[in-house]
Amino acid sequence: MKTYTNVSKYVLFKYAAYDIPAAEPLFPEPNAGLADDSSSPEIVEDRQADYWCRFIANVRKPAMYSFPAHPLNNNGKAVVVCPGGGYRGVAIDHEGFEVARMLNQWGYSAFVVKYRDPAPDEKGGTFPNGPLDDALRAMRLVRSRAARYGIRPDKIGVMGFSAGGHLAGNVSTIWQTRHDLNPELEKVSARPDFSILIYAVLSLSDSWSHSGSRVRLLGNADEETRRLYSATLQVTKDTPPAFLVTTEDDFVDSRHSFEYFLACKRAGVPCELHAYQDGGHGYGMRLRGLAIDTWPSRLCDWLARF
């Protein structure tokens, strides 16, 4: 079995497929309206040779992977993690499973979401509400199981990278616009208690917004819909506190993070922004001898406040 050495100093171990928990369907209900697995197989690419970096596209059956904190290290807090992928797929390893293991080391339970994404050649806007509904279902499931995992129901946050950061931003700002088809889960709040937005896409309506993510998610949506899915425009006093990381040389314009920070400031929402000169995009927790390598330490410090 092939194993991979994690490149982050925060997760010091080798891991293989058996270290990954089984995927739990997010919508097991027969009336969920999801495609049949056999008719729409997922497309999996392994994009790196030296570390695990699988990219999963054509996700039709959204799932959640549960990484509960060890009982001797459990701090009673949890994070729902949304990997990136430009709404073309899900970078499940370096922005999902690796992050979950890091959070486990800090005492947090982590739950990685494999949300719906269209196939690479599929028309954009195929299911614009799919990723948000998937992430909101994960938030509700985790909160409904707080006692099972030794989690405080008021200490559950959301984290996202790139387009997953866009998803986490939507969860943090428009969670109340979508309803759950399960009557019991609908009673459970989907609002996160804090949010972590790493090189996130947070606007779909500005001239500098990430057009690829916008088109893949929304297709040719009207301006009203683009504004609704622009977290920078949806921040209110009820938005949870946020931690943001961006770099000046990222092709996802740093204004996404700066505008969200300013919107939080105007609304009186606590927000911490770390902006670096170099780092690019999609680095996850990789160590490259740059100042950006320290962002997990900054996050660990910030999380201690909650």
Image (cartoon, helix red, strand yellow):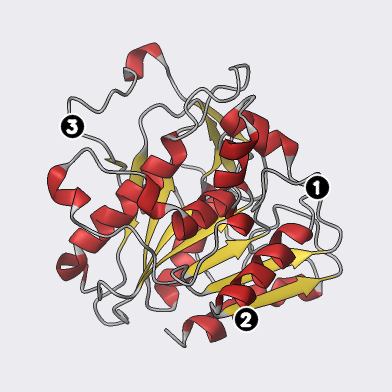
Q: Residue 208 carries which label?
A: 1
Q: Residue 67 in the image: x percent, y percent? A: 34, 60
In the image shown, does 135 or 206 lie closer to the viewer? 206
Give the distance between the C-alpha atoms of the residues marked 2 and 3, in whole angstroms. 40 Å
Give the distance between the C-alpha atoms of the residues marked 1 and 3, in whole angstroms. 40 Å
The answer to whether mark 2 and mark 3 are in CB contact below 8 A is no
Q: Residue 206 in the image: x percent, y percent? A: 75, 46
| Element marked by disc 2 | helix
Q: Which residue is drawn at 50% across and 25% down?
A: 58
Few, some or many residues within 10 Å of mark 2 (<14, 14–19, 20+): few
The amino acid type of the residue labelled 1 equals Trp
Q: To which residue does mark 2 refer?
A: 298
Few, some or many residues within 10 Å of mark 1 (<14, 14–19, 20+): some
The amino acid type of the residue labelled 3 equals Glu
Count of numbered circles in the view: 3
| Element marked by disc 1 | loop
Q: Which residue is drawn at 32% across and 42% down?
A: 23
Q: To which residue does mark 3 refer?
A: 29
Give the distance between the C-alpha atoms of the residues marked 1 and 2, in whole angstroms. 27 Å
In this rendering, which labeled residue sits more in front, label 1 or label 3? 1
Q: In which quarter of the image is residue 75?
A: bottom left
Q: Residue 215 in the image: x percent, y percent? A: 66, 30
